[in-house]
Image (cartoon, rainbow, N blue to C red):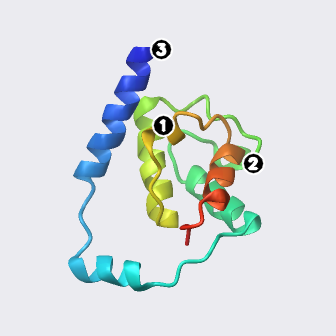
């Protein structure tokens, strides 16, 4: 179990380091945007859409109660980066390790005040 957690953490860090860097103008625009909390309905729709776009999940099976058992360490790290990009939030490896269902991700996003 410790080995899987460390692989997940390394994968998460590696994906963050390797993802294409946004141009400086886009970064400054993102920081200038007024940030608002995401409501549960919007977060649910966007998270389920992200899940449906993965190769791991059957799009017809996407629902908040869906378990994320099919995600391996690398897939979960990739998905955490996608959630971070979608909602403009940092998803630490410690948080993504606790995602057992889609509802856990939705809860994380809605409770994070910096989501957009």
Q: How crowded is the residue under tag 3: few (<14 C-alpha within 10 Å), some, or many (20+)?
A: few
Depth order, front residue of 103/57: 103
Query: Which numbered disc flags the more N-terminal residue, 3 or 2?
Result: 3
* Disc 3 + disc 2, Cβ < 8 Å: no
Depth order, front residue of 25/94: 94
Q: Nearer the viewer, mark 3 or mark 2?
A: 3
Q: Nearer the viewer, mark 1 or mark 3?
A: 1
In the drawing, what numbered circle is on residue 94? 1
Structural distance between the alpha carbons of marks 1 and 2: 23 Å
Dividing the picture into quarters, in which one does residue 36 lie? bottom right
> Where is residue 66 shown, x and y percent of the image?
72, 39
> Where is residue 46 shown, x and y percent of the image?
62, 63
Q: Quadrant of the C terminus?
A: bottom right
Q: Residue at left 41%, top 45%?
A: 78
Residue at the spot of label 2 = 63
Dividing the picture into quarters, in which one does residue 100 lie? top right
Residue at the spot of label 3 = 1
């Amino acid at each position: 179990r410790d080995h899987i957690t460390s692989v997940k953490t390394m994968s998460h860090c590696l994906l963050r380091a390797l993802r294409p860097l946004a141009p400086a103008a886009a970064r400054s625009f993102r920081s200038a945007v007024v940030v608002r909390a995401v409501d549960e309905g919007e977060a649910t729709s966007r998270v389920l859409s992200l899940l449906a776009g993965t190769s791991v999940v059957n799009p017809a099976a996407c629902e908040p109660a869906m378990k994320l058992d099919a995600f391996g360490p690398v897939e979960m790290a990739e998905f955490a980066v996608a959630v971070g990009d979608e909602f403009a939030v940092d998803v630490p490896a410690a948080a993504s390790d606790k995602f057992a269902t889609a509802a856990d991700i939705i809860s994380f996003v809605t409770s994070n005040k910096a989501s957009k």
